[in-house]
Image (cartoon, grey):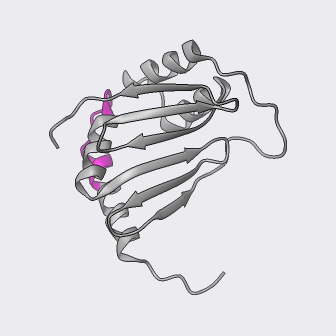
Amino acid sequence: MGNFQMSEAIENLESAMQRAMAGRPKAGGFPYLAETLRRAGVTRNSWSLPACQSLFLTEKGPVVVVGAPLISGMADVAPFDRAALIAALRTDQAGRSTFPEFLMAAWKAGVVGYDVDFAARTVTYGGASGETYVEAYPAVEV
């Protein structure tokens, strides 16, 4: 492994995530999380599915987070299904799914990655053949 020291960027991101998780509402929690991260200096967040690797670009430096992958081994990628993705988003926004359940539903809808732009308040979901769906999220007070 190596001698990993926690950087200022990691400490800042971790603390912002803890604040966001403590205060976010069950329904409509993402805008709260996003605004908390934006105020902590996070500018972008790029997710790769199904690996669940997440790259955060922050004012203090980039940080990568590797979560538990949704699958292992080889798998076919589902065709991009905009309607299924939107259904997964609405279920999550209503507080009726966990984050891992949302990620799996997005993957099953053909999403191979998504990018959050915290300044523009948009999330761009992408499919394997270059398809995209962009959704804006509201500004909230934290």
Specify the farthest residue to the bottom. Answer: 3
Q: Is residue 131 above or below residue 11?
A: above
Left or right, 136 with reference to 66: left
The x and y percentages for residue 25 are: 27, 34
Q: In the figure, 83 relative to 123: above or below?
A: above
Q: Quadrant of residue 111?
A: top right
Identify the residue at horizontal 42%, vertical 41% (top origin): 116
Left or right of 133 on screen, residue 8: left
**Farthest residue in the front direction?**
130
Specify the farthest residue to the top.
Answer: 83
Pick the quarter of the image with the C terminus: top left
Q: Could you tell me residue 24's position as x and y percent?
A: 27, 40
Left of 134 or right of it: where is 126? Answer: right
Say if 137 sits above or below 61 in the image: above
* Residue 24 falls inside the magenta stretch: yes
* The quadrant where residue 120 appears: top left
The residue sitting at 66% across, 48% down in the picture is: 51
What is the span of residues highlighted in magenta in the rendered image?
19-29
Q: From the viewer's perspective, is residue 100 above or below residue 79?
A: below
State the residue in front, 102 or 54: 54
- Looking at this view, is 100 or 31 the one in front? 31
- Res 108 quadrant in image: top right
Residue occupying image coordinates x 47% and y 83%: 5
Is 26 magenta? The answer is yes
| Number of callouts | 0
- The x, y position of residue 3, in whole percent, is 57, 87
As drawn, which residue projects farthest toward the left? Answer: 141
Which quadrant would the N terminus be assigned to in this image?
Answer: bottom right
Percent across and percent down for residue 93 are 38, 25
